[in-house]
Amino acid sequence: MQLGVIGLGRMGRIVVDRLLAADHDVVAFDIDDDAVDAAADAGARPADSIAALAEKLDSEDGKHVWLMVPAGDPVDAALEELEPHLESDDVVVDGGNSYFEDSVRRAESCPAAYLDCGTSGGPAGAELGFSLMVGGPEAAYERLTPAFDAVATGPNGHERLGPAGSGHYVKMIHNGVEYALMQAYGEGFELLHEGRYDLDLESVASVWNNGSVIRSWLLELCEEAFREEGNDLGTVADRVEGGSTGTWTVQEGLEQEVPLPLIYTALGERFGSRADDGRFSRRLASRLRYGFGRHDVPRRE
Amino acid sequence: MQLGVIGLGRMGRIVVDRLLAADHDVVAFDIDDDAVDAAADAGARPADSIAALAEKLDSEDGKHVWLMVPAGDPVDAALEELEPHLESDDVVVDGGNSYFEDSVRRAESCPAAYLDCGTSGGPAGAELGFSLMVGGPEAAYERLTPAFDAVATGPNGHERLGPAGSGHYVKMIHNGVEYALMQAYGEGFELLHEGRYDLDLESVASVWNNGSVIRSWLLELCEEAFREEGNDLGTVADRVEGGSTGTWTVQEGLEQEVPLPLIYTALGERFGSRADDGRFSRRLASRLRYGFGRHDVPRRE
Amino acid sequence: MQLGVIGLGRMGRIVVDRLLAADHDVVAFDIDDDAVDAAADAGARPADSIAALAEKLDSEDGKHVWLMVPAGDPVDAALEELEPHLESDDVVVDGGNSYFEDSVRRAESCPAAYLDCGTSGGPAGAELGFSLMVGGPEAAYERLTPAFDAVATGPNGHERLGPAGSGHYVKMIHNGVEYALMQAYGEGFELLHEGRYDLDLESVASVWNNGSVIRSWLLELCEEAFREEGNDLGTVADRVEGGSTGTWTVQEGLEQEVPLPLIYTALGERFGSRADDGRFSRRLASRLRYGFGRHDVPRRE
Amino acid sequence: MQLGVIGLGRMGRIVVDRLLAADHDVVAFDIDDDAVDAAADAGARPADSIAALAEKLDSEDGKHVWLMVPAGDPVDAALEELEPHLESDDVVVDGGNSYFEDSVRRAESCPAAYLDCGTSGGPAGAELGFSLMVGGPEAAYERLTPAFDAVATGPNGHERLGPAGSGHYVKMIHNGVEYALMQAYGEGFELLHEGRYDLDLESVASVWNNGSVIRSWLLELCEEAFREEGNDLGTVADRVEGGSTGTWTVQEGLEQEVPLPLIYTALGERFGSRADDGRFSRRLASRLRYGFGRHDVPRRE
């Protein structure tokens, strides 16, 4: 089928390649001309503007446009240019990490059918295909099934989970769980690293990945990390970036009054790792130990 | 090769079956005669006592005995009966969930070479094979490699990780991580369940298991749980049993001064789920709200 | 000085009484006529509407109005009626638990000077006086100092902490800390209650309150709770209501990327105590133990 | 009454001074001669060995000895020298931070009556008196009441809470609660410090200490800390020492299956503050973000 893809970064380019590999007709646009040229070399039809892309989508089945741009303003900016060219039997897919309430809002105002599509799997999805969590009108989802089959890990790798917003909602919570899983493995490997035995952590991860209860793709990535960085993780710093989807997950937990202590703690560890001047709470606690017990206060130089 | 297996419960029986399937010569004993008969029907040579089992292990390569009995006293009881029959070129494997310091102690006093072998994978290992984390003398591990190949998921499913105790040490921490992973998925599904959309959780788990970053065997078990119990988990009670290996993991974290907040929280949720009279801490907090603010105190009937 | 007080609930009535006790001239209004009558009996001048109250505030120093109504819409409703009667040299105090961003907004639109005033101390403040955390213009705070002196625990019991919103901001965080303190004492007493000795918890609280590092007013309230409810807290249920200011505190922590694990955990315990059907996360964890280990699943009847 | 005091460090010296101030007859010993001389200057009778101290305790009421030495081996060492001089109607008080199970053991083997006495209040107790949590035989506690009256904040500042070990048990849990309270205030002040307003934290602490729900002695110490160190806590480092009693509290929680998430988290913050090479768990999480998403990995220089 015919698809326009807007946004040719790492993830958007994978979408293009997997669509092309499945013999779909792809029109590609990015604000970076080089990215458009590269997609053209790979077999996509290039467009030098969103308007041009819309024009080249000339199938009788209606226009199908897959957005793969950063969450927030870039999505609204792309939609603003795109929407004048859309009609009610067209379909827009937002495959980025948008906040689910933004997706609900956009679905309401978009002249075309609007599918929010949480996308997980990262660059490794280039070969394997992604996990696609889709929200929005059923008919639109059905129509785009051939595209989803191509981009996902196959027919089981995509699913319409509910109405507008539900795809990004599920993806948001997916990411919250992801934070906690990473921290859980991290705790285990930290204890193994600091603990009583001189262990080869790559071997531990490897044997765990072969038949244990805690085997997973993230654990395979742990194995890879120890193989590539060494048993002490080499120069990797104690600083964890990111956090927006985890923050949204915790906020939604507050809204729904669902306690998420593991996800919250994992998010807090990220915040804490970025406290470049040290944690004020701990500095106060240290000073209080002097206050009540005259314990020595460690001082900065 | 020739092996004696002591303990024919769910896990021990799988060890027997996988050894037999790989054409090893198995002598089997359990305090339950029926379990011995069943193993005999499957092709093992039955023994009606540990002494009898030891006698039937007549290979020139030395005796090899695999213990698969509950952690704690049963291991010591089995060893007490077994050790009079052992010599220094024999090998004992403890495949249960023993505390690693017990394994160090037993390795020191056992007349044979002693391998502590953490075993993960559960009953599903019957078909796939287990993940085996082995500690103890290298030569003994080498000698039993054919048996480990048979019981594990293959050559990558077992590994000698270090000296005596290290196998059970790694298994202990594996279990701590397992608690946290279960709780992490639990938080995600709880929020999905209580949240804004009416979601089919089996579908969510399924699409996540196909290509997402958080795919794992535990997530496949979540999918199975929703399929078999229903979207609301039916009659499954809010009561999580178990906790000994998680407790050991937390204790080791205290010893090593490694914070394990996710593992601790997951363990605490188990404890909390078993507080049949409610949590005293929360009852006090509720009463304090009356104390300072004259807020109504919910009362038991 | 002359003050109008709008809202004669538990806290508003204390404001009235303390102002009267300091010989201020108080005009009192509430939507509940009985509350107005009671305040009149105590010595306040009654008003049967906000307009009437405004009219009776006839001092040449300008009108001074203290709002003590529930946070949210009631504050806006009162202001809507009040503002037509206000001029730029009048002063409004919002002594309730308003969200600080609402206070910033109201301060901007109010024709009079606007002071947001976090109030802590609860009904016990009737005798002792409150702790008042004030935000807003310095001149207005100076002008109302005699009233603050009367309502607070004295001159040290009130402070202007910064510009508009800062009073309610500090009160919000005060409440977050309060949740954590309550839970911290709760954990200690729970362990004492479940632990190795048969202890009289009132005695423990009493001896702690006399000279220990952890002595506090909340601990005095613990002592009172055990004295009044008994060592087992009698019929007090495991259900903690409330949570809005704690939720705001956690949200602000997310905004500022400051981890608040104790405050979050204390809030989560409240949420968890209200999960009448049990915690879904734990129910899933219990079912997963069957999934990987065939452990028995406790079932609801 | 007549008392021997062994251990004249900061706390032991306060015990001596308060006993002297109440006109008790004090014999003082320390391994540091200067400390003995100083106590003698203050009015105590000096002893140059434990044997000499025992000899000087010549009252017909029996010998009374107060130990104020570091927990662990020093207590056993002092008892080893002291016990040959003791008889069944003598009384030993261990006022240090001993582990409660050690106190139970010592009470069993000590020829005299043995009181374990948790002591809280720190150096500030010099003026105010301590909170004393006493375990052991009732008769011995009654006998020493005049001494406890002198050392404690008065008759309400000491209490016999139960049999041997219960005093140190309650003190252990007191300290666990203390960790959590300090961290709770720390979280609040960290958010105030990093938050939206430019606040004077000493003023905040001061207004909270005058009438608020969260007023406490620890909060007075926060106020003092900001006054003495400045609003940014000056050179106070992000490193919190100590942790043994908190660790014991958490271990006891594991034993009793009582979740203590706030106390555990506060303890973990101490551990984390001492991880000089950064937290391995977070370093792994950062590297995993590269693994699944090709996010940049912050590197150490």
Image (cartoon, coloured by chain):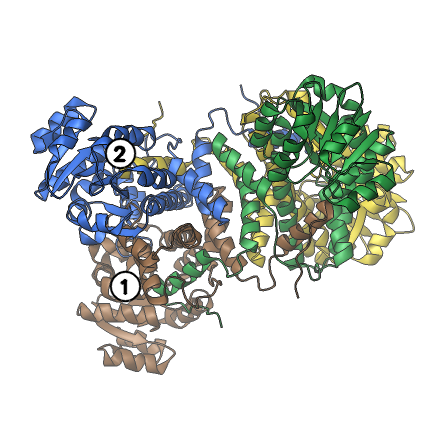
Chain colours: A brown, B blue, C yellow, D green
Q: Position of residue A267 (x, y in %)?
A: 48, 54
Q: Nearer the viewer, residue C238 or B232?
A: C238
* Residue D219 as seen in the image, left or right of residue B48: right
- The chain to which mark 2 is attached is C
Is residue D87 visible in the rendered structure shown here?
yes
> In which quadrant of the rendered view does residue A7 lie?
bottom left
Q: Amino acid at mark 1?
A: Gly
* Residue B60 in the image, given as x and y percentages of width and height: 10, 42
Residue found at x 46% / y 46%: B253
Q: Are marks 2 and 1 in contact (CB under 8 Å)?
A: no
Disc 2 and disc 1: Cα gap in Å? 34 Å
Which residue, given by chain and number where applicable, does mark 1 sit on? A125
Q: Looking at the picture, tell me which residue is in the foreground, B147 or D157.
A: B147
Examine the rendered structure and indicate whether residue C156 appears above or below residue D174: below
Q: Which residue is mark 2?
A: C294
Q: Local crowd at mark 1 within 10 Å, few (<14), some, or many (≥20)?
A: many
Can you give x and y, in whole percent of width and height, for residue C87 in the image? 81, 55
**Which quadrant of the structure image shows residue B194?**
top left
Q: Amino acid at mark 2?
A: Arg
Quarter of the image for the N terminus of chain C: give it: top right
Tell me which residue sits at (62%, 43%) in the image.
D179
- Which chain does tag 1 point to? A
